[in-house]
Image (cartoon, rainbow, N blue to C red):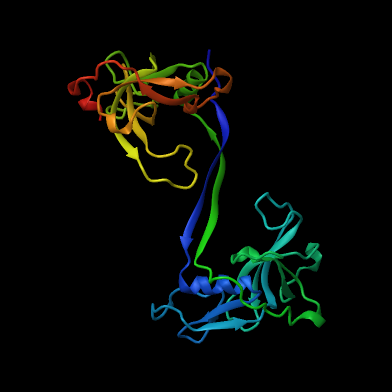
């Protein structure tokens, strides 16, 4: 019987926090007060947003210029079906907009109601967010400018400290189809079992299994069931807190070599004082309640010491 490979949507995401420096900081601080700032390069051109360094001299850009908030569409593309992360939840255009007083174009969304209202050369003005924090989303979008309002709103007085840091969510969503080896490994976890793979009875046992042996390239066609206990080989004591951390430091991240396996994998070690952790410690899996199991190694909450005598170094020295 041939099992169908497993497939599931994956979402790799994190919040990227960076210091913006004096150039981008000036641009973002301006947005917070309804002001768009460009930077003048050594060639006399005004760039929006301002670049941190001059493309010709490689020197920092320090000559900031207030440009108009009204501009002209130089090119555009209509988005008929917006996605979740798009700036508007109804059809809109992405456009390059050359603001008055600028020599380059800014990419942003234009809310034009329909593609019939969009055209190259049309005049647009920003729709400002009610609550502004100092990032590009302070401009919700641009919209067609009425002739009587082309001057746009007056900048507001400065409030708060200059913008020095910015956090940008980064996300990649895709569908992953597991290999045959990954699939039987994940199905095993869903049943509370570890299943590794090897080429034959003389081959090394890999868990998670590989499609082929990395030493000789032969397919790892033989399945091997392994126990949920083994030896802790190397480890790290985590003392520094970080954003998104689920466990309060200090705690132990270690490589666990299951009995019968030839390669360790990383997991948490808890129920152990970090001061007493050591290489060779015997550990066992602490499984979550069965109703919480899925096709994931997260079925195991953590590993914990068994209380058995430590393994001799020679028994695992080739698996570090």
Horizontal relation, residue 68 to residue 166: left or right:
right
The residue shown at (68%, 50%) is 83
Q: Residue furthest bottom?
A: 44
The residue shown at (66%, 70%) is 75
Horizontal relation, residue 34 to residue 320: left or right:
right
Q: Give above or below for 26 relative to 180.
A: below
Identify the image quadrant of residue 48: bottom right
Q: Position of residue 128 (x, y in %)?
A: 70, 69
The residue shown at (47%, 73%) is 22
| Depth order, front residue of 157/223 | 157
Q: Give above or below for 80 relative to 129.
A: above
| Depth order, front residue of 225/140 | 140
How many dots with numbers? 0
Q: Position of residue 76 (x, y in %)?
A: 68, 66
Is residue 125 visible in the rendered structure shown here?
A: yes
Identify the image quadrant of residue 204: top left
Q: Position of residue 183 (x, y in %)?
A: 49, 24
Is residue 49 visible in the rendered structure shown here?
A: no
* Image quarter (top left, top right, bottom left or bottom right) of the C terminus: top left
Q: Give above or below for 46 relative to 84.
A: below
Identify the image quadrant of residue 152: bottom right
Q: Give above or below for 63 relative to 209.
A: below
| Depth order, front residue of 78/297 | 297
Q: Position of residue 301 (x, y in %)?
A: 47, 26
């Amino acid at each position: 019987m041939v099992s169908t490979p497993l497939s599931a949507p994956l979402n790799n995401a994190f919040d990227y926090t960076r210091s913006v420096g004096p150039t981008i900081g000036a641009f973002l601080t301006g947005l917070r007060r309804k002001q768009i700032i460009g930077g003048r390069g050594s060639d006399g051109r005004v760039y929006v947003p301002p670049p941190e360094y001059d493309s010709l001299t490689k020197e920092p850009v320090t000559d900031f210029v207030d440009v108009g908030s009204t501009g002209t569409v130089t090119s555009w593309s209509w988005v008929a079906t917006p996605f979740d992360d798009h700036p508007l939840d109804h059809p809109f255009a992405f456009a390059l907009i050359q603001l008055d007083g600028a020599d380059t174009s800014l990419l942003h969304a234009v809310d034009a109601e329909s593609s019939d209202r969009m055209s190259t050369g049309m005049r647009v003005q920003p729709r400002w967010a009610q609550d502004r924090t100092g990032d590009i989303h302070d401009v919700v979008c641009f919209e067609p400018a009425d002739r009587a309002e082309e001057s746009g709103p007056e900048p507001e007085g400065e409030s708060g400290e200059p913008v020095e840091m910015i956090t940008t969510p980064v996300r990649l969503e895709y569908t992953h189809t597991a290999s045959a080896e990954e699939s039987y490994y994940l199905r095993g976890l869903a049943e509370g079992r570890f299943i590794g793979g090897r080429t034959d009875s003389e081959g090394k046992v890999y868990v998670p299994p590989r499609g082929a042996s990395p030493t000789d390239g032969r397919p790892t066609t033989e399945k091997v069931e392994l126990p949920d206990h083994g030896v802790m080989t190397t480890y790290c004591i985590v003392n520094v807190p970080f954003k998104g951390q689920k466990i309060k430091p200090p705690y132990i991240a270690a490589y666990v070599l299951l009995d019968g396996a030839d390669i360790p994998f990383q997991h948490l070690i808890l129920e152990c004082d970090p001061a007493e952790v050591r290489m060779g410690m015997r550990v066992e899996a602490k499984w979550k309640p069965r109703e919480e199991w899925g096709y994931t190694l997260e079925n195991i909450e953590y590993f914990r010491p068994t209380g058995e005598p430590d393994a001799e170094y020679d028994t695992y020295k080739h698996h570090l």
